[in-house]
Image (cartoon, helix red, strand yellow):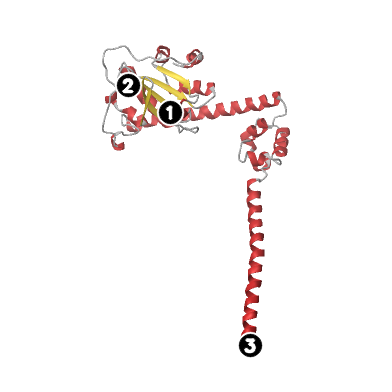
Amino acid sequence: MRQVFSIVLAVAAFAATAAGAQQVEPDALRRSQAQQSQQVGTVIHSSQIDRSQWASLTEADWERYDEIMKGPRRFWSPGVDPLTVLGAEARSDAERMRYAEMLVEQERDRAEKELAFTRAYGDAWIRMYGDEKLLDPVRLGIEQVIPFDMTDRIAIFMDTTCVACTNIIQQVLPHLQRAPWPGLDIYFADKEEERIQRWTAAAGIPYDMVESGRVTINFEEGILAQLQGTDMPSYPVAYRRRGDSFSPVEMSYLLRADLYTTHDAAPATGTAGGGFLDRIKSLIP
């Protein structure tokens, strides 16, 4: 009888423990979910932002920002800059344009600083390493060299902030000036025409090469997505274009001098899109 009573007590204790565990688990789960929700929807207040970086915003702008970030925008745009938040939630076309112009000015300043650093980087490389290549194709295991022919063009897909791309293009240009082919087509992921204009001027693209079509400056407009078969293409990337065929090549491969022959023939030419050529004309040396 004593043994039976002991067994009953043990079963009862186990049942109580199991019930307690079932109660604790939902409580812990709810606390975890609440913490995650609080982190995702954390209200960002203007007092947490260094306002000196956004000097164009008024006190009324900051009050408007704080009000917006109390709502669903804190879930939709965590970590997004104040100008974009204010512009997205603008209450009129005039207000939206005001914030857009502020952001353009700020982006322009950022681009100029980055382009200045790109030029300084190139100058420092030449001063420190002379003719040594930025990227060594031999170390990448590229053994077979197929020189460009008169029907070839180089297609480079990039954005204006790619320092390595800019340096490679600047090293490729002298080869293009000495050889009659290939042509060079630069496709930008950037949608801001002014930013591309500033990059073109800073990179030192010779206007006569653009005017002749030897070098073209283009908006990317979905071409790379078709080539890569994805809605989210990867930048930067280079291709050898022969007619309608695009073959991917390593960016560093373009630095090989033996790709560029110096035969006597008409140079490769292309066509820059629309009136874009006319608009960048005054900015190219």
Say above or below: 178 vs 39: above
CA gap, disc 3 to disc 2? 99 Å
Say above or below: 139 vs 101: below
Q: Of the residues shown, which amino acid type is indicated by label 2?
A: His
Question: How many C-alpha atoms fall within 10 Å of the one at disc 2: few (<14), some, or many (≥20)?
Answer: many
Q: Nearer the viewer, residue 247 or 58?
A: 247
Say above or below: 136 vs 214: below
Q: Which residue is mark 2?
A: 175
Give the residue drawn at x 67%, y 38%. Answer: 73
- The reply to whether residue 267 is visible in this rendering is yes
Q: Which residue is mark 3?
A: 2
Mark whose residue sits in front, 1 or 2:
1
Q: Secondary structure at mark 2?
A: helix
CA gap, disc 1 to disc 2? 26 Å
233 sits to left or right of 244:
right
**Are the residues flagged by discs 3 and 2 in contact, CB closer than 8 Å?**
no
* Circle number at residue 227: 1
Mark whose residue sits in front, 3 or 1:
3
Q: Secondary structure at mark 1?
A: helix
CA gap, disc 3 to disc 1? 81 Å
| Quadrant position of the N terminus in the picture | bottom right
Give the residue drawn at x 63%, y 32%. Answer: 84
| Quadrant position of the C terminus in the picture | top left
**Are the residues flagged by discs 1 and 2 in contact, CB closer than 8 Å?**
no
Give the residue drawn at x 54%, y 24%. Answer: 192
Residue 251 in the image: state x and y as whole percent: 37, 30
33 sits to left or right of 225:
right
- The reply to whether residue 158 is visible in this rendering is no
Q: Secondary structure at mark 3?
A: helix
